[in-house]
Image (spheres, rainbow, N blue to C red):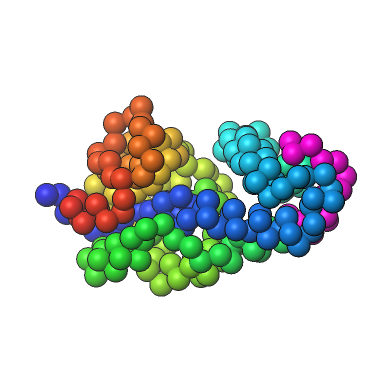
Amino acid sequence: MKKYQHLFFDLDHTLWDYDKNVQESLSELFEVYQLVNSGIPNSGEFIQSFYKVNFKLWAMYDLEKIDKKSLRETRFKLIFENAGADPNLVPKVMEEDFMHRTSSKPYLLPYTKEILEYLKPNYGLHIITNGFDESQTKKMEASGLAPYFDLVVTSETTGHKKPDPRIFNYALDKLGIKNTETMMIGDNPNSDILGAIQSQIDNVYFDPNEKGIEHQPTYTIRHLKELEGIL
């Protein structure tokens, strides 16, 4: 079996349990700011509205139709509107509070620590993420991921977002390695898998919910422990 020297991981939804961390933070915000008094009936409606709005905003961000500042300034106003509440009632500190709470959450997806312990002695481990610098750093520290990884590459640092091959090439250049010496592991069919394919990097599609993919990944796994059969 082919021997790799380095492994690139996505962070959110691949190692860091985005859904659990975000939902817990949103439930806390609903209670702290008593959002029922702002016209949002319950935390479930608040969380559902968050997902609808956040997905659209990040899709726009990935297509460079909005920037980081616009995303953060409009996110909760749009969430309130979606939930049937007055956007003018959004607490001024809510976005900052949300980012702090969420980035400070420790929850990881199943087998994350186990597979990193398994891989660390034999591979250089690195992160390539489209997330923002400060939040991704906090997430890795709060969840205990930081010690496992040597290089963390963000779209904010490089000015390029996955699937743009330039973010992958940036990581390769920083490490002084070839694309044949590494593998990309991630959950997103486009940013992770298509990005790796376009960069001629072998890849593993992490598909725990069996959503499927239109591209042809090198490997597909349902849980992270399956990497032991590949690496």
Residue 196 in the image: state x and y as whole percent: 35, 40
Q: In this view, does 13 lie to the left or right of 85?
A: left
**Can the viewer see residue 198?**
no
Splitting the image into 4 quarters, where does residue 109 fall? bottom left
Q: Which residue is the extreme one toward the right?
A: 88
Measured along the vertical axis of the image, is residue 115 above or below residue 192?
A: below
Measured along the vertical axis of the image, is residue 57 above or below residue 95?
A: above
Q: Does the magenta stretch include residue 118?
A: no
Measured along the vertical axis of the image, is residue 178 above or below residue 220?
A: below
Q: Which residue is drawn at 59% across and 53% down?
A: 23
Q: Which of 218 and 84 is in front in this view?
A: 84
Q: Nearer the viewer, residue 184 or 188?
A: 188
Q: Residue at x 51, y 66 (%)?
A: 106
Q: Nearer the viewer, residue 140 or 32?
A: 32
Q: Which residue is the extreme one toward the left?
A: 1
Q: Which residue is drawn at 37% across and 68% down?
A: 148
Residue 21 in the image: state x and y as whole percent: 55, 58
Residue numbers of the magenta segment: 81-95
Residue 39 in the image: state x and y as whole percent: 82, 44
Q: Nearer the viewer, residue 230 or 132?
A: 230
Q: Which residue is the extreme one toward the front?
A: 41
Residue 31 in the image: state x and y as whole percent: 74, 59
Image quadrant holding the C terminus, namely bottom left
- Could you tell me how many numbered marks the image carries? 0
**Can the viewer see residue 82?**
yes
